[in-house]
Image (tube, rainbow, N blue to C red):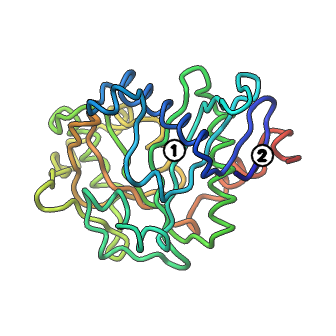
């Protein structure tokens, strides 16, 4: 466990600690399954935890509320799962590759890193929390010389026609160029070019996009071709790619320089 920063009672850590990972898995279960309607396996339901084989090989970025934590019982209120290419290649690849062909995706420099399983406890969904989490991601990117971030970004629901405006907006306006463009696997491919560009109401499309996906796009994120309907998680997933060198300067300053005073002093 490595402490990266602290903001008031919140402590940001990169961890492989079993107790902290278990607390993150319980948070993921509450958010994904109880709040968002994902369908757990019987084992997940019995344990009250979201988990898979990637948890054992990934690093975990967690935010712990020290005021609610006691001894070996950490209270994790925010988390990301992060998996570097150099680690994934020897351990079954990326989780994202279950739905998307990544064979044509190349990092502009350094290596790729997968972001996944992002969630925050409802009472902690503030700008300060996202600022803290992105402080950790930025530090990790610098430490490991990451040139490209990738992962699944989700829209709620499993009906592509209901999300046609948002999906078509993504296709027409933020489709990644060749060399950076993942593609949904043939057996799971769902068309995202569902409406012509002149039929897209930008305001309505943006309203359909979840806040996290919009934040990725503001930082320079792009998406691959096609989507995957994930019925377990009750989502429509697109594959997002974000070259770290293209992160807009104002967002770098916001997330890394305008962080909370306690975090800046850590």
Secondary structure of the residue carrying numbered label 2 = strand
Toward the right, the furthest residue is 265
> Is label 1 in contact with label 2 (beta carbons under 8 Å)?
no
Residue 160 lies, in percent from the top left, at: 17, 39
Residue 117 lies, in percent from the top left, at: 45, 44
Q: Between residues 170 and 22, which one lies in front from this camera angle?
A: 22
Q: Residue at x 49, y 49 (%)?
A: 216
Mark 2 packing: few (<14 Cα in 10 Å), some, or many (20+)? Answer: many
Q: Residue at x 54, y 71 (%)?
A: 147
Which dot marks residue 5?
A: 2
Horizontal placement of 251 versus 182: left or right?
right
Residue 128 lies, in percent from the top left, at: 69, 34
Q: Quadrant of residue 208?
A: top left
Of marks 1 and 2, the one in the foreground: 2
Q: Between residues 157 and 171, which one lies in front from this camera angle?
A: 157
Q: Is residue 13 above or below residue 24?
A: below
Which dot marks residue 215?
A: 1
Q: Is residue 124 above or below residue 6?
A: above
């Amino acid at each position: 466990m490595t402490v990266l920063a602290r903001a008031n009672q919140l402590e940001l850590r990169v961890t492989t600690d079993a107790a902290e990972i278990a607390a993150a898995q319980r948070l993921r279960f509450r958010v994904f399954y109880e709040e968002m309607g994902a369908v757990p396996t019987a084992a997940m339901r019995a344990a009250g935890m979201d988990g898979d084989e990637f948890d054992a090989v990934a690093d975990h970025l967690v935010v712990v509320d020290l005021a609610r934590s006691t001894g070996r019982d950490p209270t994790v209120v925010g988390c990301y799962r992060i998996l570097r290419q150099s680690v994934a290649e020897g351990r079954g690849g990326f989780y994202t590759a279950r739905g998307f062909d990544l064979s044509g995706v190349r990092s502009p420099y350094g290596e790729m890193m997968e972001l996944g399983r992002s969630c925050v406890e409802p009472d902690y969904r503030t700008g300060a929390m996202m600022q803290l989490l992105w402080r950790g991601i930025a530090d990790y990117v610098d430490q490991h010389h990451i040139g490209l971030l990738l992962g699944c970004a989700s829209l709620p629901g499993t009906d592509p026609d209901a999300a046609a405006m948002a999906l078509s907006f993504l296709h027409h306006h933020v489709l990644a160029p060749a060399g950076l463009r993942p593609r949904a696997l043939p057996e799971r491919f769902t068309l995202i070019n569902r409406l012509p560009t002149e039929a897209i109401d930008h305001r309505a499309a943006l309203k359909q996009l979840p806040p996290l996906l919009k934040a990725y796009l503001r930082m320079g994120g792009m998406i691959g071709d096609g989507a995957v309907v994930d019925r377990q998680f009750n989502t429509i997933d697109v594959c997002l790619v974000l070259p770290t060198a293209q992160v807009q300067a104002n967002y770098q300053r916001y997330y890394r320089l305008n962080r909370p005073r306690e975090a800046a002093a850590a």
